[in-house]
Each structure stands twice: as structure tokens, then as C-alpha cells.
Image (cartoon, helix red, strand yellow):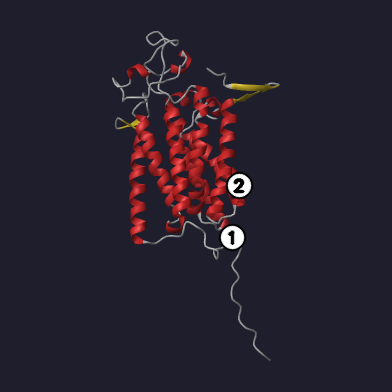
Amino acid sequence: MIDPVAFEIGPVQVYWYGIIIASAVLIAGLLGTKVARWLNENPDDGWSMLLPVMILAVIGARLYHVIHQWEFYSANPIAIPQIWNGGIGIPGAVAGGALGIYLYSRSKGMNAARWMDIFAPALLLGQVIGRLGNFVNQELYGPPTSLCGVDFPPCLPFGIQIDAEHRAGTPWDAVTFPVETTTFVPLFAYEMALNLAGMLVLLFVIRRFAPRLFAGDATLMYIMWYGVVRSLLETYRVNNWTILGVPTAMWVGIIGSVLALAWLIYRHRRGNGAPMIRPAEEPETDAPVPQPQAEPSAG
């Protein structure tokens, strides 16, 4: 088990969680730079929008978690902004980030759907790296591996130890399930592997088929992929935020995947959409397009 505090600078504690998230953003941004060039966009525009997009993504992620744990946060409002202690929701981050891309792109006259495509594989890479924070904070784990195939679906034959403090709110107390001899399903590791696979698939599709695709297609594929991944992993979790007895994240994942697939099929049957690769004649920014001027009359 790792101390969540990486180091201290005077009275300031620097957490591993923050280092990991910052690294995830930087590395994902570098991947986005490469994809932007593939799609004939200016990578500098991506770096310019990164800060406002990340701010809205973090706000959305935290709000999703706070709503999920509202009973606790309503009694402890001072803990709401303490994101360094962990607690974010990826669906909220995706919604907030997408809103940020849309607002920034609209303000600059850029194609928002194309920029969402650029960030889609980068987001998956960021999620892969960011899940290491769950390992440090002992979050996003499933049941004891001994219960797999009994009370839960089968799992891989390896697990991680979780101390008693981080089992609060679960049925697996340290007396019945001793810390030294009990291992838990590392759901964060499962998600890391699946998201890495999804990133590679998206990169392949964009690189190979972009000339035949519409702007927004990669984003729809991301929604489908992550929706299925998240829905599968929810079957291993307990004490989830539920609606009608079904985990909220599963509702979001299933509905999002179905709608994304339906929209992807519909738009390609219609054959109408902006190209994924920016045409050379399309303005790169919101610079005004020169208007034709009337010929001056002679004499």
C-alpha cells in the first residue's frame, strides 16, 4: 500500500493523485497533438482549449461524484472541493469536457465534432493513466476474489489488498476478510486494460478510415466503447448509486452506447456530415472570410 502523499514542500503536501492526473493530462494532450495533425487541424488550437476544457471536465467529474455520495457531502460540504482525496466520476468528466470543447470551438469558429474526435483517443489514454490514482487511493475495487464465480461474475486470478479504512461502506469488514489474506478485484486495472485496447482501436480507425468518416464518428465510437466497458465493470461493484435498482453508471453506459450506435448508423445512411479530416479550404480559425468586392466603376 502506497502513501497517498508523494512529498511535502514546507507545509504543502503534494499527492500522488494530483501528480498522476497532471501527467495524464499532459500525455493525453501530446497524443491529441498527433491526432490533430492527422485530421489537418492546428495542434496549437488543442493546447489553447485544453485549460478551459479541463476545468469543466474536473467540475463535471466532481459533481457526478458528489451527487453520487450526496448523503456524505451534504453533511460535510467542506469536503466537496477536496478532490485531492479522490472521488471523481468519469461520466461527469466526459460531459463537462465535451461541453468545454463545444463552447470553445463555437467561440473560435472551429468544428466542435472534429475536435471531440481528436480528444477521444486522448481521453482514453488519460483514463488509463488516471486510474493509477485509484490504485494509490485504494479506490475502484470489486469484491474479494474468493467471491468471484459465487456471488459475482468470474474474475482474473489476481487481486490487491485493501486496508480496513478504505473498506468503509462495503460488506467486507477486516474481521471476516482479514487484510493480510484477502485480495480484492482490481477493477481499475481491468478498466485500464480495456481502455488501452479502446484507444488503440480508435487510433487505428482514425488513421485508416478517416477519409470515409464524418466528424463526430470517433466520439460516438468512444461513447459506445466506454459505455460497454463501464456497464460490465458495474456488475462487480456494491453500494452503487442506483436508479430503479440498476447502477446509474450502467444506465448511462447502456443508454449512451445504444444512442451513439443508432446515431452513427443513421448519419451514415443519410451520408450527410462534415468530413472528419478538415478540408484544405475550410478556415482554420474564426478569422473572417474575405468577401467579394464590387468592381469599381470606370470614370
Question: What residue sits 45% from the left and 23% below the top?
Answer: 72
Q: Which mark is residue 273?
A: none
| Quadrant in the picture for residue 31 | top right
Q: Which mark lies nearer to you, 2 or 1?
A: 2
Q: Kindly state the secondary structure of the residue where label 2 is placed.
A: helix
Query: Of residues 176 and 155, which is closer to you in this image?
Result: 155
Position of 60 relative to 1 (above/below): below
Please indicate, yes or no, whether residue 206 appears anywhere in the rendered image.
yes
Question: What residue sits 34% from the left and 16% below the top?
Answer: 146
Question: What residue sits 51% from the left and 46% below the top?
Answer: 119
Q: Local crowd at mark 2 within 10 Å, few (<14), some, or many (≥20)? A: some
Q: Which residue is mark 2?
A: 47
Query: Of residues 149 and 247, which is closer to you in this image?
Result: 149
Q: Local crowd at mark 1 within 10 Å, few (<14), some, or many (≥20)? A: few
Q: Position of residue 221 (x, y in %)?
A: 40, 46
Q: Position of residue 3 (x, y in %)?
A: 57, 18
Question: What residue sits 58% from the left and 39% below the top?
Answer: 27
User: Residue most toward the top?
Assistant: 175
Q: Position of residue 179 (x, y in %)?
A: 44, 11
| Kind of residue at disc 2 | Trp
- Looking at the rendering, in which quadrant would you find the C terminus? bottom right
Position of 84 relative to 113 (above/below): above
Q: Is residue 108 left or right of residue 271?
A: right
Instruction: Determine whether label 2 and label 1 are within 8 Å by CB.
Output: no
Q: Is residue 24 left or right of residue 269?
A: right
Q: Position of residue 281 (x, y in %)?
A: 55, 66
- How many dots with numbers? 2
User: Residue most toward the bottom?
Assistant: 299
Q: Kindly state the secondary structure of the residue where label 1 is placed.
A: loop
Q: Which residue is mark 1?
A: 286
| Kind of residue at disc 1 | Asp
Please indicate, yes or no, whether residue 69 appears anywhere in the rendered image.
no
